[in-house]
Amino acid sequence: QVQLVESGGGFVQAGGSLRLSCAASGSIFSIRTMGWYRQAPGKQRELVATMSGGGSTNYADSVKGRFTISRDNAKNTVYLQMNSLKPEDTAMYYCKIVMPAWAGAQDYWGQGTQVTVSS
């Protein structure tokens, strides 16, 4: 079994910063992709940022230049540094990891951490 524990969410004023963390534990030999997604009330879950094992990143256009994803492979942890936050960034943020193909390519989701940005 694999468990993901997210932390770092909270309430912040527009223009502020937050740093999210997601630590994976359990039967993990390798992680192919680690990433963050978010879901606002009444909206579909959307990609925020992902990072491959080789360090390649992918960002949603809405967060480019403001958010930075990073990962510590030794700790099986992924981070999301969020700067210049806007009210429209308010959402539940979810961590997701994807295992390599040789490990079954299974994906796992965290429980989510709430981010609220006031105007």
Image: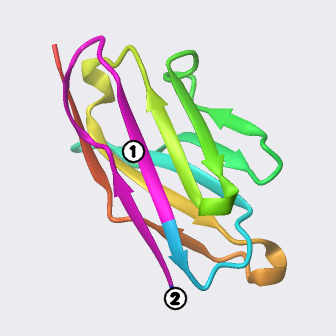
Q: Which label lies toward us, 1 or 2? A: 2
Q: Residues within 10 Å of mark 1 (few under 14, many from 20)?
A: many
Disc 1: which residue: 38
Identify which amino acid the numbered label 1 is placed on. Answer: Arg
Nearer the N terminus, badge 1 or badge 2?
2
Disc 2: which residue: 1
Residue 68: within the magenta? no
Residue 49 relative to residue 84: left or right: right
As drawn, 62 above or below 35: above
Quadrant where the C terminus is found in the figure: top left
Range shown magenta: 2-23
Q: Give the Cα distance between marks 1 and 2.
A: 24 Å
Identify which amino acid the numbered label 2 is placed on. Answer: Gln
Residue 15: within the magenta? yes
As helix, strand or loop, the secondary structure at mark 2 comes to loop
- Residue 68 appears in which quarter of the rendering? top right
**Of 32 and 44, the residue lying toward us:** 32
- Name the residue rendered at 32%, 57% in the picture: 112
